[in-house]
Amino acid sequence: MAEFDVVVIGAGPGGYVAAIRCAQLGLSVACVDDWKNQQGKPTLGGTCLNVGCIPSKALLESSENFERVSHDFAAHGISATGVQLDVAKMVARKDKIVTDFTSGIGQLFKKNKVSSLQGRATLLGRDGETWRVAVVGGEELRARHVIIATGSTPRVLPQAPLDAVQIVDNSGALAFTEVPKRLAIIGAGVIGLELGSVWRRLGSEVTILEAAPAFMPAADDQVAKEALRAFGKQGLKIHLGVQIDKVTQNKKEVFISWKDAQGAAQELLADKLIVAVGRVPNTDGLGAKEAGLKLDAAGRIEVDDHCRSNLPNVYAVGDVVRGPMLAHKASEEGVMVAEIIAGQAGHCDLNLVPWVMYASPEIAWVGKTEQQLKKDGVAYKAGQFPFMANGRARALGDTMGFVKILADAGSDRILGVHIIGAMASELIQQAVLAMSFSASSEDLARTIHAHPSLSEVIHEAALAVDKRTIHI
Ligand SMILES: Cc1cc2nc3c(=O)[nH]c(=O)nc-3n(C[C@H](O)[C@H](O)[C@H](O)COP(=O)(O)OP(=O)(O)OC[C@H]3O[C@@H](n4cnc5c(N)ncnc54)[C@H](O)[C@@H]3O)c2cc1C
């Protein structure tokens, strides 16, 4: 029986980061993971590296290049004829990026002396101060501390069972071998919109059916409205307030019967259907019930602000606990827990987790939305500036969208920053940093920004809070 200071269950961005940080802090650590790729080979990195953040961004980049060369280059005086699309090569490039990154985690584990084990782990119980963890196909592990980072799995829609060929989840949608002519997507969340954008850019006619009556309800209302308009202009057909009645298929196509927001019966024929109706916390086979681990009503492991579960020395981080299902949130929680176990003061402020959507336009935000501030009765000032009035955005030919900064009416402290437009995913970091240091909008307004740069839109939005923009 191998004994460690810490056993980490799951090697996604929550688990592998926690394991490495534990090792850096001098703790002996084992990380157990049961992921196998499509070839049945064990790989590290969890959802994020294998079928999530990394492969989706690789395909978003490839498809954006295809769209640019096909439609946008002409405005620059560059003509391109005979543009060809090789989907197999595009997917192989994505697969290589995934393999490089997943094998890189193995090297990081070796470098940091993290013991990496393959197999499903189950919490068996506690002998005195020591937790016992069974690993399927392996030996029993013992550790004083356990970090659970078992992530999430795609939510199943009973009306649309997956067949991994015509009806797929995110994994299948990242591995199509040709561009589907008619692509239906159930779910207009981040995953549905990103994958829909990939295949629309490559030529699919995309229809998205969303049950919620509002589009992107977690985003700032003004951003969500602008995004819905932009996606519509690109040709993504998005229906809200939809009820899916029945999905059937033959060898050629998928047939979806649904009701629109007014309750009228509708039908949709598609070559492929992506089901992207959210993700559910993954506690399968963990032995949660037997060990007495408390779950909340949504099936997530219940934790406090420091990711402590109800069991002594058992922590849980990432998608399997409350908060946004985002890789960087999982990793920061992993770091926090490792530092707490090592006797340091770990910290992770969920209000400072940036949210990002990488379709075009990119959308990113941090902190409170305008509707949240109104609901909470907080007096605030808003400053907004459009990319259209920014020199770098004009040079890029990417001028849609705006930055909006919300600041406390009294103290001027920044409460939220919302970006829709070019490189929002990169620009948001300036806002996260500012808010991490409790900056005011005046602090941002007095910061010198390079010219010409997209970050000047943030500068001008900060000036706008005090009604003193220069370029509008
Ligand atoms: C298509 C898509 C795109 C995404 N894009 C982004 C993005 O751009 N940015 C972003 O921040 N987030 C993105 N996400 C979300 C992100 O992938 C997750 O938030 C993140 O992976 C969560 O990390 P985690 O460590 O909690 O869990 P996971 O990454 O899900 O890892 C959990 C691991 O634990 C293993 N496991 C589970 N149970 C056991 C057990 N009992 N024993 C052993 N091993 C077990 C699993 O096999 C898995 O390897 C995306 C997700 C998808 C699906």
Image (cartoon, helix red, strand yellow):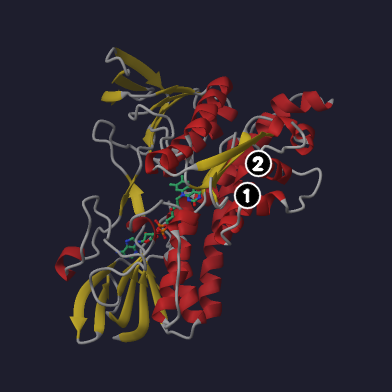
| Helix, strand or loop at mark 2 | loop
Is 175 placed left or right of 79 in the picture? left
Q: Looking at the picture, which amino acid does disc 2 mark?
A: Asp
Compared with 70, 317 (above or below) is below
Q: Quadrant of residue 395?
A: top right
Q: What's the residue at 49%, 75% (across, down)?
A: 21
Q: Considering only vertical position in the picture, is 277 above or below 105? A: above
User: Which quadrant of the figure shows ligand 1?
Assistant: bottom left
Horizontal relation, residue 240 to residue 179: left or right: left
**Percent position of residue 187, x then y:** 38, 33
Image check: 378 left or right of 70?
left
Q: Residue 113: in sight, yes or no? A: no
Whole-percent x, y for residue 175 in the image: 49, 41
Asked whether the residues under the numbered discs 1 and 2 touch, taking CB atoms below 8 Å apart as contact, a structural biologist would say: yes
Residue 6: in sight, yes or no?
Answer: yes
Give the residue number, with chain letter if any, for mark 1: 441
Q: Is residue 436 left or right of residue 396?
A: left
| Residue indicated by mark 2 | 466
Looking at the image, residue 423 lies above or below residue 24: above
Residue 469 percent coordinates (x, y): 72, 37
The picture quadrant where one finds residue 40 is bottom left
Furthest residue in direction right, as rendered: 77
Q: Amino acid at mark 1?
A: Ser
